[in-house]
Image: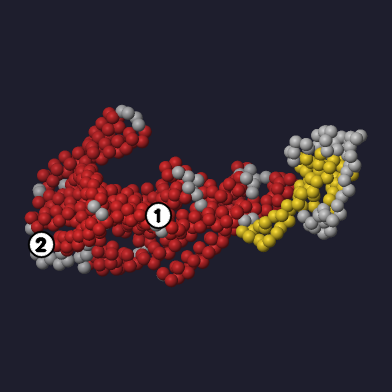
């Protein structure tokens, strides 16, 4: 029996080895591995030529002084042709053997008194003046060369010329145009990666909390609150858009009154926001407020939000005006004014979506509280009926929104198919779910948000930034701006994964201790989560900047700007010495970034 077991293991191992051999053999076939191509002499010569060019990057150059020497030549020989002039031995000259010949014949060209150790073309110059290269000369240490060339088939009764062109270096070496252009592009690449990392980090930090299972797992909400939230969210979005548009109009009127009034408006808005917030959100409260007081506080928070919108729009308009003014008056530092104006435009651009989202989710929060109070006060049968009714309406609204999105993407132009049927199916599913659940059942809202966030980030991470930049290049044009957007989007998805996994690995002790004090969810995150994640967040952010520097050299191949665009051009044109300069610059920057990020991590962590 033991022998049979040993035999079985041996057979299993043999089958495994045989299967591995078959797999690798098929892999060789699929990947077309061909060692004959490796040993081909022609391919080896091409490889060596490219390697030699790559080891000679075009970094510096000399100014060139050109020497041109002509020797007359009759093709074919003429009976009445004058004798060639005697050469001047005090300077460079050439001797032709023979002095005349038939078209297509071979002649010997010998040069004297040239600059030593130089190379250059040897050309045939017909009466038309078009230069026809016949070969390349190379002088020795004495400035002498001998070369045999074949005359082109260009006959003429007039004298034609053999021309030698040589160049020598003069002056001191200086950076070549390619090196200067490489320096500009590598600086562009570094800042491209810096901006992409900054924008990606700003968005990834708040979203990473939604992708942390340990924080979202406990987030639940009653069915009634969820249904109400789905119904009121579009209303909140509409109110937020209307508020942003109205407040922006007021801010533009204030901007037209002058910068002094704009700054005064900012100061007054800030003071009112602080004062009203202190009243609406007292730090300590002995007795719970009544209904009227709660409504007044909610209204006060709405006023604070409107004042915040006014302050942001006023700040954006002020920054745009001041930046435009300074741009033309700071001379070489005009980019500072441009930067200020760009920041103002970015702020104005982001205020609207932030207003829409805050309004939508704020109204959802209020509806959630209303649903919770209704469950506490209503009987189970009444709550069940409300769940079924609101569940059907919310399901219809949710599925209709999904159908509208599909209609916008695919443009079926069939409202019955994309709106009617989804709404009916959603109403049926929502009512059925409400009917099957207990009246006071809670839904795992946090798990749903967690799964949606992780799925979205996984999809974005699966799409390489090289593909993203193609889309952004169509949107904003070819250049570094498209590269910043592509890298920023990929950075958001990658950092959300890293940040959320770090949040999931924090120690549970501080989290439970803070919760035991009766702290709210926001207070728990501030005092128990954030102190544990700051050091790894800094480390991940620096590492992502390092990655973005290397990735930014690739997205240039698809129009994302940076040094990759220049590298692609030189590779396509077979300018391997120029390409070697870009490769060297990339290697130096990556090495420096590695040392810099390591030093910064040691100081920050």
Number of disc labels: 2
Crowd around label 2: few <14 · some 14–19 · many ≥20 (10 Å): few
Task: Work out whether residue 183 or residue 286 is closer to the camera in this orientation and state it.
Answer: 183
Q: Quadrant of residue 100?
A: top right
- Based on the displayed image, in which of its 4 quarters is residue 404 positioned? top left
Can see residue 492? yes
Q: Residue at x 81, y 39 (%)?
A: 160
Q: Is residue 263 above or below residue 462?
A: below
Residue 437: x and y, percent? 20, 45
Which percent across, then down, holds residue 421? 27, 31
On the picture, is 468 further left or further right than 573?
A: left
- What residue is drawn where x is 16% and y is 47%? 439
Location of mark 1 (residue)? 328
User: Secondary structure under badge 2?
Assistant: loop
Viewer-nearest residue: 546 or 41: 546
Whether residue 230 is visible: no
Q: CA distance from mark 1 to mark 2?
A: 58 Å
Between 593 and 442, the one lying in front of the other is 593
In the rendered image, residue 40, in percent from the top left (x then y), is placed at: 73, 46
Q: Nearer the viewer, residue 386 or 9?
A: 386
Image point 80% across, 46% down: which residue? 70
Q: Which mark is residue 418?
A: none
Query: Left of 69 or right of it: where is 456?
Result: left
* 602 lies above or below 109: below
Q: Are marks 1 and 2 in contact (CB under 8 Å)?
A: no
Where residue 288 is drawn, which disc sits there? 2
Question: Can you give x and y, in whole percent of width and height, for residue 214 in the image?
Answer: 31, 59
The residue at the point 42 percent across, 57 percent down is 334
The quadrant where residue 31 appears: top right
Q: Secondary structure at mark 1?
A: loop
Query: Does label 1 or label 2 sit earlier along the sequence?
Result: 2
Position of 107 relative to 603 (above/below): above
């Amino acid at each position: 029996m033991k022998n049979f077991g040993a035999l079985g293991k041996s057979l299993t191992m043999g089958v495994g080895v045989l299967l591995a051999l078959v797999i690798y053999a098929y892999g060789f076939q699929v990947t077309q591995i061909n060692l004959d191509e490796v040993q081909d002499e022609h391919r080896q010569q091409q490889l060596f030529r490219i390697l030699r060019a790559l080891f000679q990057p075009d970094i510096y150059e000399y100014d060139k002084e050109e020497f041109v020497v002509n020797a007359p030549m009759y093709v074919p020989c003429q009976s009445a042709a004058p004798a060639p002039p005697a050469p001047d031995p005090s300077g460079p000259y050439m001797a032709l053997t023979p002095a005349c010949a038939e078209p297509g014949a071979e002649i010997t060209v010998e040069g004297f008194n040239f600059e030593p150790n130089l190379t250059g073309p040897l050309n045939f110059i017909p009466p038309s003046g078009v230069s026809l290269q016949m070969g390349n000369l190379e002088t020795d240490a004495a400035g002498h060369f001998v070369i045999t060339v074949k005359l082109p088939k260009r006959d003429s009764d007039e004298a034609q010329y053999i021309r030698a062109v040589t160049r020598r270096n003069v002056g001191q070496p200086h950076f070549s145009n390619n090196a200067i252009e490489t320096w500009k592009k590598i600086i562009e690449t570094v800042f491209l990666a810096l901006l992409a990392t900054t924008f990606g980090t700003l968005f990834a930090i708040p979203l990473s909390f939604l992708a942390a299972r340990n924080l979202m797992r406990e987030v639940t909400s009653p069915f009634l609150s969820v249904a109400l939230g789905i119904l009121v969210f579009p209303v909140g979005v509409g109110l937020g858009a209307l508020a942003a548009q109205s407040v922006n109009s007021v801010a533009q009127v204030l901007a037209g009154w002058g910068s002094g009034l704009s700054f005064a408006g900012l100061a007054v808005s800030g003071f009112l926001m602080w004062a009203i917030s202190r009243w609406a959100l007292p730090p300590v409260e002995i007795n719970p407020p009544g209904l009227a007081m709660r409504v007044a506080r909610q209204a006060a928070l709405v006023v604070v939000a409107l004042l915040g919108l006014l302050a942001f729009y006023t700040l954006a308009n002020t920054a745009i005006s001041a930046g435009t003014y300074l741009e033309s008056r700071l001379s070489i530092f005009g980019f500072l004014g441009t930067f200020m104006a760009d920041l103002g435009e970015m702020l104005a651009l982001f205020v609207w979506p932030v207003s829409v989202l805050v309004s939508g989710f704020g109204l959802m929060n209020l509806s959630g509280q209303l649903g919770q109070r209704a469950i506490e006060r209503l009987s189970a049968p009444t709550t069940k009926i409300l769940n079924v009714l609101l569940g059907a309406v919310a399901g219809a609204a949710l599925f209709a929104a999904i159908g509208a999105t599909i209609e916008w993407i695919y443009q079926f132009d069939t409202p019955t198919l994309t709106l009617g049927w989804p709404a009916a199916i959603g109403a049926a599913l929502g009512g059925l779910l409400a009917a099957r659940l207990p009246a006071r059942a809670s839904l795992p809202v946090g798990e749903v948000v967690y799964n949606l966030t992780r799925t979205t980030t996984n999809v974005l991470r699966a799409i390489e930034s090289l593909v993203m930049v193609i889309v952004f290049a169509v949107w904003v044009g070819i250049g570094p701006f498209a590269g910043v957007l592509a890298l920023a989007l990929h950075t958001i998805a990658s950092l959300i994964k890293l940040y959320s996994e770090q949040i999931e690995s924090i120690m549970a002790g501080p989290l439970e201790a803070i919760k035991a004090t009766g702290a709210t969810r926001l207070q728990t995150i501030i005092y128990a989560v954030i102190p544990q994640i700051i050091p790894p967040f800094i480390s991940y952010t620096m590492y992502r900047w390092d990655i973005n520097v290397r990735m930014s050299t690739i997205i240039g191949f698809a129009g994302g700007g940076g040094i990759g665009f220049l590298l692609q051009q030189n590779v396509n044109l077979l300018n391997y010495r120029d390409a070697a300069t870009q490769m060297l610059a990339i290697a130096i920057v990556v090495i420096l970034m590695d040392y810099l990020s390591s030093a910064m991590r040691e100081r920050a962590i």
